[in-house]
Amino acid sequence: MKKILLIFMIVFTAQVSLAQVKNVKGLITDSDGMPLPGASVSVQGGQKGTTTDFDGLYTIEAQSGQTLVFTYVGLETQKIVVGDAAAINVKMKLAASHALNEVVVTALGIKRQKKELGYAVQDLKGDQLNKVITTNVATALSGKIAGVDVSIPATGVGGSTRVIIRGISSIGESNQPLYIVDGVPIDNSGLNNDTAATSKWFDGRDNGDGISSINPNNIESLTVLKGAAAAALYGSRALNGVILITTKKGSKGKLQVELTSGVSFDRVNAKYSDYQTEYGSGTNGTLPDPTKGPNEIYNYTTSAWGPKFSESVGQQIKIFDGSMKPYAKVENNIQDFFNTGVTLSNGIALSTGSENAFVRFGYNNLKNDDVIPESGLERNDASLSGRIKSDKFTLDANVNYMVENTQNRPGLGDSPNNVGYSLSSLAPSFDQAWLKNYKNEETGQIYPWNTNVYQLNPYFTTQANHNSSVKNRFIGNVTGTYQIKNWVALTFRTGLDSYAFSSKDFMAAGSTWPGRDEGYLGLDNINVSEMNTDIIATFSDIKLATDFTFSGILGTGRRDFKRDFNSRFATKIIEPGTEYISNFVNQTENAPVVTRTRTNSVYGSAKFDYKGYLYAEFTGRNDWFSVINNNAFYPAASLGFVFSDAFGIQSDAFNYGKFRASWAQVSNAPGAYKNALNYTSFSSYDGQSVINIKNSAAPNANLTYQSKTGIEFGFETGFFKNRLKADITLYREDTADQTLDLASSATSGYEFLSVNAGQLRNEGIELFISGTPIKTNNFEWGIDLNFSKNKNSIISLHPDINTYAISEARWAGAAIVAQVGGQYGTIIGRDFLRTPSGEKIVDANGMPLFTDNKVNLGKGLPDWAAGLTNRFSYKGITLQFLIDMKFGMDVYSMTNSLAAQKGLLDVTTEGRDAYNEARAEAVANDPNFSQSTWIPTAGYVAQGVVNTGTPANPVYVENTKPVNPQDYWTTVFNNTPAPFIYDASYVKLREVSLGYNIPKSVFNGAKINSIYVSAFARNLLTFNKDLPNVDPESMYTSGNGQGFEYGSLPFRQSYGFNIKVAF
Amino acid sequence: MKFKEIILAIVILFTAVGCTENFDELEKDPVALSANPAGQLTFTQLCMSGDGYYQWRANLIYSGGFVQHYSGAWNQTEFGNKFKKNDDYATAIWRNGYANELKNVVDILDKTKGNPAMVNMNAVAKIMKVMVAHRLTDLYGDIPYSQAGLGFSQGIVTPKYDTQEEVYMAFFSELDEAYNQLNAGGGTVKGDLFYNGDIAKWKKLANTLRLRLGMRLSEVKPAEAEKQVKAALQNGVFESNLDNCIMRHLDATFNDNPASIDFRGNGLAYAFIGNENGDHFSTLVIDYLKNNGDPRLTMLATAKTTSALSGKGGQPVQPGEDLYAGVKPGSFQYEAPGGATATSGIQSYYKQKTTPYLHVSYSETQLLLAEAAYRGWVTGSSAAEYYKKGVEAGIKQLAIYGAPLPTQPDIDAYLNAKPLVAGTEKQQIGTQLWITYIFNSIEAYSNQRRSGFPQLIPITNPDSETGGVVPKRLYYPNDEMQKNEANYLEALSRMGGTNDWLNKVWWDAN
């Protein structure tokens, strides 16, 4: 370790001799008197600046009469005039939880005082992101920032998260924000672009996203640029908002070593507590005939239409492997399939620095064994950041290298490898442990275990099939800044995000999956590189007149993006046990998918500061895109007015008031290659080429970018010396000329039409309140409340087409759509046919009737969300908990609809006893009894009416016709999603953490600076009034198709411990 | 550095950035290929039987269920036999037929038009277009045809629905054009998996399709039907099983990943396997073959393995018991007396990836001509002669699957024992066509609706959504309402006002 450090020192230490004027020294401490390392000290109006070392000490050259400015992110900036004293010690003030003079990072990495800004930004410190150990840092954002909607789909190990800022901006494209790390964009496009589509048809997996590569322990702060004006300098990439991440840097001082170690345990809730517990395997109230062979018995593994347990005491049932088992309710059945997940995170960070060079090295290892057996991930992350500076020149370099290995990501939705889908269908008499016997040990045959060939035995999935992936990612940037004059600096910055992702999906021979029944191997390789280079001139504090100051930038940039996707698959394994492609008979290489795009940009900003209370800013950016060979201009204007300063209306009760207003236009460029007809080839037929038109969307030579116009107003207020602060924002954002692949009539030859059409509006309100109700010397209670409400409306789509399909469900023809006049994410499907007064209409046989057309049945996006954080600190102990809630969204739960069809759901018990009894009697009385033609004399009587008149002149009478409940629920399952659309609103106790800073006296004498220990829990409690059996956050995709759940993996609770030791 | 110099430097930089000279190149997909009529023809031919998605839904579940070729497997019985609606099943062939097959055929026509070296390719594409589209109109009724597939080349995204009569008239003229266009000097047809570019065979296929489609109008427009049948016969139809239009599939994987779907294996076989081999021939098929001593019984079906007798469940087939039993339409396999193993299965050679797919056959040609002769539209041979040849060819055509052929004396004995009998001509011919089309249930369903034969076993299941009435068509995708509203509603107004599968298509005037 020492050797490594020595090398770093040699590389990064560059001594530059300086002329001595006068050295001012001092100690900077926080409000508790603890030394504050990394605080900035600068001479006002000059370029000289330094930061405090690890012991909070600084030295700076200054002359008497000059003003020193002391800043620290999150603390109040202090200004002190240099006098005769050689030492100036400063105690920084921690106002409420966020100070008003707070410095925030804005677009292009420019640090600004928050009070200057004419638009909303909200930030989080790194310590709010690593309180809880997660495998994806974005999950830690949940509930913490107003207007940021974070969803964590139930997609298993290494999955992606969904982060949406101020609602959906783009109807048809990704709505996830742009992530910027240390000023340079990283790719967050996701590795499986549409898990919704692939999860519907057999083969969905979530391969994760870009942001999961960022190690939370390296994050210094995170800033969210919510609206168009805040993000406008990112032009064609700003449509969905921007999240800026600043990583930790080294600081001046002796070597500092920080060790972090944590463990987290995950437990699932798979109790399916609203499943019925009275009836087990079987059909029509009977047990399978034990004289029949296994291939007629396995029908009943997932069919719970058997006889009542209470009337079948002591009976035996034959199961799929031919063995006999007791016929009784199995307790705690599905829960036992899952393990306790364990995540270990261990890291070390070393930092040091001299006068003119700083370096920080961080390494972290994260190892996760998932709740699903054999599933897990390991991530190693190393980062190095350094800075060398001289009088006029500063060079920063940051590199981050990450390797992630995952094992056995679960199949999602309809995937035959989805263990959630298989397990949630088990009859209550069927012990999941019986499935362990998936293979006949004598013959090697894999037992078929139910009728659906596309549903595999979960033990076969976890034990015989494997998938794995490796991601190697490099994120790095170099920034050089030359201070040409004291009012102008030139910055050159280049950043590269490059990753290679490869995955292997192996399936053993012998399963029932057609096409993969003789073994399968799929190999995917994705290579992405995103390179951004910028040259920026920064003009600062140019006095135009008394009280009137100008600052601005002028910059130019280029972005080069490359993505290559290559895939191969093979079937029919030659020798079992060897999982590489040449061991397969049939090998197919798919056509590669290659994307190359370039964007050139010019941008600038001008900020005017009048008397330190009125700020106006104008920005503009012009982007030239290669994808459509076109260019676009993005203007923005904003105004910040600190009226409390302007009118001098501060008092003890009201100490700060600011008004903000902004207007801006941003966009995103359309996807590549949509403006020409392209052809692609399939595997050849005996050497003959097989060519198909590649475009599923009719190409459009005139395709252009979509653009968003946003307008925003806000008030910021501070009361009682900032003990209570409120920030309220109102916004309206319209995205017009949506780049859409609009579903067009298949008869045009194209499923879609690439167009610019339609307008979508988001209007909303965001509220952020923070307060410190109690503050004494030893005890403090802090509250942060954020609330956001967003209303989305589709104003127009296309002259010929008024519905855009976002996602289609596997069953009952349900879809998630955007419809003119409606909200994005409306769930549509057939409903029960009803009389004008709302009663269900059934046919003459007692079966329900359904509407011909699909009608609105719900919506997948929330109306409002809120997060409440409470923080209590007493001496060194901090207790923090976060309550996170979302209201107004629905989910079509196909786990529940399938459970109804299979007789598992509690509602399916009605009428069963009567039906079973009547049927048994009919069977006894009629030797030629036929199930398919027998008309039930008792059973389930659907609530509703029958039309005994004509269609034109209906006469409705109460339905009295009994039907087989099994037929009834099968018909309902097939035809309508309506009974299975539930309100998914929830309130969750999202995070609880209890931390303790062990007093130095405890380890006095040891070479330890501090020890911090904490315990935490995540998702401790969930309240939802409507949705049975599955968690309200059970979506199988992080894409736009929110509102479907199918065979979801049980939701997890986690809890664990962290320790942080600094030397 | 002075202020002016800084500005100058920045201006120079910006000028450099403004350069977008390589953007023309970056705008193009680096891995896209060019139009390739031969490769697109291969693709279209593969799709027509290799698309397991709609073979499963349109051919096996619905058509195969409606005409009672099959029964027993869950979705096939529940939806196809009992007439329950499932949008996914009802719209599968509509979605893929237009988006894969018609789209490429229309593109081939577009790219080969007026090219003297591509005259034959152009003609073949015309025939392919009819082959693809007649399935669609037969299943749905009025369909977009004249404006279909033009979403890019002409920007038509909401094609109008032509009446079925207009569509059929277009078929006849296109087939006639294609026939007249095909000539030795019209360039070779590459990529042709049906006939390997044999122009003479394509001419015969054009005429045979004309015969098939001409006969389709026998009830609604007999004079037109007669005219088309005569023209087809005069130009030359199939003359033996060697002329049959067959797709020979490869042992390629059934890949169901939509991103990399592979059409090289037999899609119907994929469907049989996807139904977990749960499909069985119905009692209508088995009983017909059994009662007539038809040698195809053993060529198509496997013997049952356990007894169907009461009390003998699971035991070997008892002495004297029938070896073959179908599954009653509307019943699941396990509901058969004695359970699934007491019923006949489908011979395994029909369920391989490499199982060929028979699109148009000599057998059907002769049987259709038998009916035409019976109606007095054609002379030359008698109806009975045509019938006999049609049945014989229907037996022998099973050889392509690997079914063991009976000896010629055995075949002759059967043919002589079961000749065309006066008074039951339509029934016999209709039934034989239904057997000849056994793995092409879509065509069987069309012919059954037209002719009314064979008579189907009434469906008495109380949970049938139509009360046991066999649907007369498949219903349109409901999303046409959103995507092509005006044209869709106009078509519906001609077809009974509602998108109901009990409304008949135009030629179904029976």
Image (tube, coloured by chain):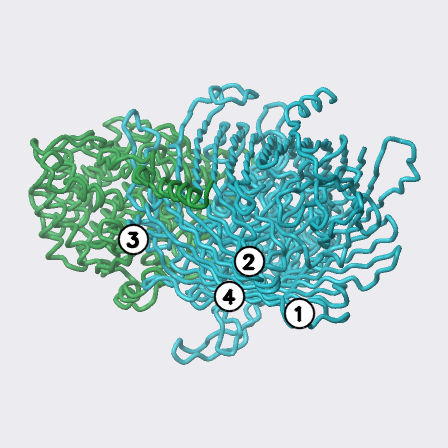
The amino acid type found where label 1 is placed reads: Ser
Whether callout 3 and callout 4 share a subunit is answered yes
Q: Which residue position holds label 2?
A: A549
Tell me if mark 2 has few (under 14), some (14-19) or many (20+) residues whose alpha carbon lies within 10 angstroms of its own.
some
Q: Which residue position holds label 3?
A: A747
Q: Secondary structure at mark 2?
A: strand
Q: How far apart are the alpha carbons under marks 3 and 4?
A: 38 Å
Q: Earlier in the sequence, mark 4 or mark 2?
A: 2
The amino acid type found where label 3 is placed reads: Thr
Q: Quadrant of the N terminus of chain A?
A: top right
Image quarter for residue B209? top left
Tint applied to chain B in the drawing: green
Dot 1: chain letter: A
Q: Position of residue A190 (x, y in %)?
A: 52, 42
Q: Position of residue B29 (x, y in %)?
A: 33, 38
Tell me if mark 1 has few (under 14), some (14-19) or many (20+) residues whose alpha carbon lies within 10 angstroms of its own.
some
Q: Earlier in the sequence, mark 1 or mark 3?
A: 1
